[in-house]
Amino acid sequence: MKRLRVAVVGAGHLGRIHAKLLGEMPDVELVGIADPVAGARDKVAADCGTTAFADHRELLGRADAAVIATPTRFHHGVAIDFLKIGTPLLIEKPLAADLAQADDLVHVARQHGALLQVGHIERFNPAFLAAAARVHRPRYVEAVRASTYTGRSTDIGVVYDLMIHDIDLLLALVDSPLAGVRALGMAVLGRHEDVAQARLEFTNGCVANLSASRVSYTTAPRRQMQVWSEQGFVAIDFGTRSANAVRPCEAVRRREFDYETLSGDEKAGFKDRLFTELLQVEPLEVETRNALVDELRDFVDSVVANRQPCVTGGQGRDAVAVAEAILHSIQAHAWDNRHSGPVGPLAQPEPNILRGPHWQPTAVPRTGAA
């Protein structure tokens, strides 16, 4: 059987993991690892039994497909070189540093018939897959991602670093255009926002509140989401890979339950009954799986079968569009309710990511699969 020749560009934290997992796939030949830092590329090459390259362009034509795991600011420049010769790509999230670059990548991929996948790994999280099967017409979504500072992805802020995960999941769940954004953020340790909170409203009436922090005072990262619909809600913990469905009993569903009519004794035992009788909790069956292996497997299988991957370039582009709208709103936020005072995350903005202080959010069109 002919093996698929795959290259990895970027020998940082994620690049090392991608290279290791690809090297363990029996139908894949890891043909090289490219990184400008000699020590990094040489170590990955030695560990994975492949060849190290200083420049990604040395891999053009040597690989049937490639994984781009560079810092975000290099995604566009590196990916374009591969896409222009039709090489299928898996690009780590976010797809690009801004919407213009994301649009260009999707356009060039289509122009040259190259498969383009984006590494939104939470789509493969088994807890999300179990919960998503129970979600119909979400009306309200609440998500939080909080961690301590890792020192990685410092070329972008927390919106592109962490919140982008929940943006992508939200767009996968809510089949409706974005109607408006209200957001704020604060820069703590650098030029980019380290804390962000966003309220997203969709044209079908769904509302989502997303919170993200990479300077959280926490002993363990929090990666949680609740999705409310008419049938109840699902609670997802991405870190523990667990999920629960919570459904109201018939009396609550028909609005026949009234706490104020309960007797004193009934109220005294109310807490014990709440999540047994009134709001019935069902732990969902979650498979034990490695999400990154599944993501890479989807990429390899998509290339071989010439089919669309689970997360297309167009979907990655849509997540970038929403992230950019959130960043615009963060930059426009007036901390004392007047634009003559302090606005934005109190940081020096990136010109290609953050626009002027008077930008107003508008509907963000979605491209669909690409």
Image (tube, grey):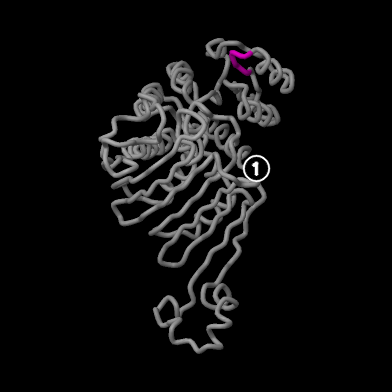
Question: Does residue 132 appear in this view?
Answer: yes
Measured as percent of width and height from the top left, residue 3 is found at: 64, 25
Q: Nearer the viewer, residue 288 or 96?
A: 96
What span is colored magenta in the figure?
A: 33-37
**Left or right of 122 on screen, residue 286:** right
Where residue 206 sits in the image (x, y, percent)?
A: 35, 56
Kindly identify the residue that appears in the image at 45 percent across and 81 percent down: 259
Judging depth in this view, the residue of 246 and 136 nearest the camera is 246
Quickly name the residue at label 1. Answer: 290
Residue visible at 59% across and 50% down in the picture: 126
Give residue 361's quadrant in the image: top left
Image position, residue 213 (x, y; %) = 51, 42
The N terminus, quarter of image: top right
Q: Disc 1 marks which amino acid?
A: Asn
Left or right of 20 on screen, residue 144: left
**What is the secondary structure assignment of the residue under circle 1?**
loop
